[in-house]
Image: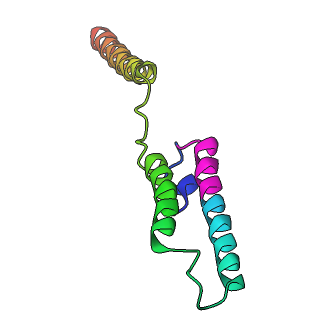
């Protein structure tokens, strides 16, 4: 999942932290595989399940922390501006209606 596209409010720094942790885990795993390949098949393995789980838990923790970050609520200042714009729009509509009424009254008097 690409966090940049799906969760745009996550900062570049946070995405880089996740990428870096994944890169570290991948490099560690590749090193362990190389060491294991160099050992004789009858020797005890270097890489075991618990070590891999431990390394993946670190990756999982940081990914979960970053990916579960909620989208921030818009600042209250923006909400106030939107409300003011709505009120201004309503006032303009009211003024237009008054002008039409005034024009109609004038034509009625003239007529």
Label count reads: 0
Report x, y in % for residue 58: 50, 54
Report x, y in % for residue 62: 50, 50
Using the rendered view, name the quadrant where residue 28 is placed: bottom right
Using the rendered view, name the quadrant where residue 101 is placed: top left
Report x, y in % for residue 73: 40, 32
Q: Which of these two is toward me, 48 or 84? A: 48
Q: Residue at x 65, y 78 (%)?
A: 33
Report x, y in % for residue 105: 28, 11
Report the magenta stretch's main SS.
Answer: helix
Considering every residue shown, the one lying at the far bottom of the view is: 41
Q: Is residue 54 magenta?
A: no
Q: Which residues are magenta?
A: 10-21
Q: Which of these two is toward me, 75 or 87? A: 75
Q: Is residue 12 magenta?
A: yes
The quadrant of the picture occupied by the C terminus is top left
């Amino acid at each position: 999942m690409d966090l940049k596209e799906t969760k745009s409010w996550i900062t570049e720094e946070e995405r880089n932290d996740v990428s870096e942790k994944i890169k570290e885990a991948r490099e560690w795993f590749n090193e362990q595989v190389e060491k294991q390949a160099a050992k004789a098949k009858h020797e005890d393995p270097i890489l075991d399940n618990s070590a891999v789980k431990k390394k993946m838990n670190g990756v999982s923790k940081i990914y979960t922390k970053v990916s579960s970050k909620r989208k921030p609520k818009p600042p209250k200042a923006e909400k106030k501006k939107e409300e003011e714009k709505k009120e201004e729009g309503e006032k303009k509509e009211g003024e237009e209606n008054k002008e039409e009424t005034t024009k109609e009254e004038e034509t009625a008097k003239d007529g």
